[in-house]
Image (cartoon, rainbow, N blue to C red):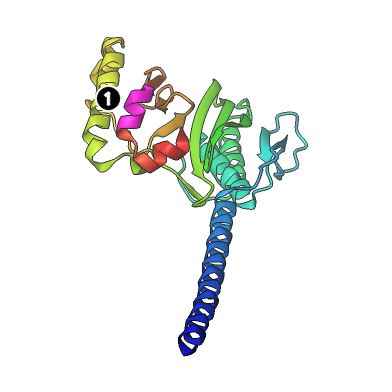
């Protein structure tokens, strides 16, 4: 009789312990699922809802017929950091038109551009004020990576430039600009350099004797403008950027080359 009672007690205790273990496992599973959901939500970036609009800039009041002409078409998004990043990149491009490199806001860059135009006009009465038109486009997005294209048309000191393009890549998750060099696998940097130099030498052979004479022997690419699409990455060098009178150069990597040189986690999120 005592054995039967003892057996029943042990069975009851076993059921209670099993219930406790099941409850703990259920709680652990619930917490794990909740943690996973929070991680997934953190990885999902807000929808940008891109809206084209004119940039909010101030230009000096002008009473004469020959006034500076600056038009900037920008984009507004729901990401405040990205909006500020776009504005700063626009400032960089405006400074590039007047050979400046400083950490400026868009308005400060406009002010510097106006000042340079005023100096030019003051040199000779027939000198015309500068003209600049900028257009902004979000060219491509993939997960946290975003490609922006800025195009400018200028008329400065009797020299007209049409469709000069700049490319910038942002990492929205890390909230920073991205250079191509930072994404290349360390062991693949030599391979990447060979791809770039081979394309450069092919381009160089097609140039005039004067361009060949003044062009650099090697093309530096670590901080150059670059772009990406569904096929792969590429480099962009504007007209005159490599050498005076040198034409535009675009270097495209194939999908296989891109996968080979990029860090694996970058490639996974970018393509």
Q: Answer with the quarter of the image where residue 265 lies.
A: top left
Which range of residues does the magenta coloring cover?
A: 254-260
Q: Nearer the viewer, residue 215 or 13?
A: 13
Residue in view at x 51 percent, y 86 percent: 5
Q: Does 208 sit left or right of 123 as displayed?
A: left
Which residue position is annotated with label 1? Answer: 195
Residue in view at x 52 percent, y 51 percent: 175
Q: Position of residue 78 (x, y in %)?
A: 69, 47
Secondary structure beneath dot 1 equals: helix
Q: Any magenta on residue 117?
A: no
Q: Nearer the viewer, residue 107 or 183?
A: 183
Q: Position of residue 47 (x, y in %)?
A: 66, 43
The single residue placed furthest to the right in the displayed view is 63
Q: Answer with the quarter of the image where residue 198 lies.
A: top left
Chief secondary structure of the magenta portion: helix
Q: Answer with the quarter of the image where residue 131 lies.
A: top right
Question: Which class describes the residues within 10 Å of circle 1: few (<14), some (14-19), or many (20+)?
Answer: some
Residue in view at x 72 percent, y 37 percent: 51
Q: Position of residue 64 (x, y in %)?
A: 75, 33
């Amino acid at each position: 009789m005592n054995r039967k009672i003892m057996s029943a007690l042990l069975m009851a205790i076993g059921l209670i312990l099993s219930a406790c273990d099941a409850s703990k496992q259920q709680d652990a599973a619930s917490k794990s699922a909740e943690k996973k959901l929070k991680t997934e939500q953190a990885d999902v970036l807000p929808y940008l809802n891109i809206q084209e609009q004119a940039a909010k800039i101030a230009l000096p009041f002008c009473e004469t017929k020959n006034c500076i002409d600056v038009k900037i078409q920008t984009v507004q998004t729901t990401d405040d950091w990205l909006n500020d990043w776009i504005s700063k990149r626009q400032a960089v491009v405006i400074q590039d038109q007047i050979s400046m490199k400083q950490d400026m806001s868009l308005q400060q860059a406009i002010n510097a551009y106006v000042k340079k135009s005023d100096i030019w006009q003051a040199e000779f009465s027939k000198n015309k004020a500068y003209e600049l038109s900028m257009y902004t486009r979000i060219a491509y997005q993939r997960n946290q990576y975003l490609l922006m294209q800025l195009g400018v048309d200028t008329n400065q000191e009797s020299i007209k430039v049409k469709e000069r393009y700049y490319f910038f890549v942002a990492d929205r998750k890390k909230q920073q600009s991205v250079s191509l060099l930072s994404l290349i696998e360390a062991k693949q940097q030599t391979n990447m350099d060979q791809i770039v130099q081979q394309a450069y030498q092919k381009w160089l052979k097609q140039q005039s004797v004067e361009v060949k004479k003044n062009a650099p022997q090697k093309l530096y690419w670590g901080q150059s403008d670059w772009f990406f699409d569904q096929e792969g990455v590429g480099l962009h060098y504007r007209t005159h950027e490599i050498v005076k009178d040198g034409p535009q150069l675009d270097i495209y990597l194939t999908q296989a080359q891109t996968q080979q040189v990029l860090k694996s986690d970058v490639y996974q999120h970018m393509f």
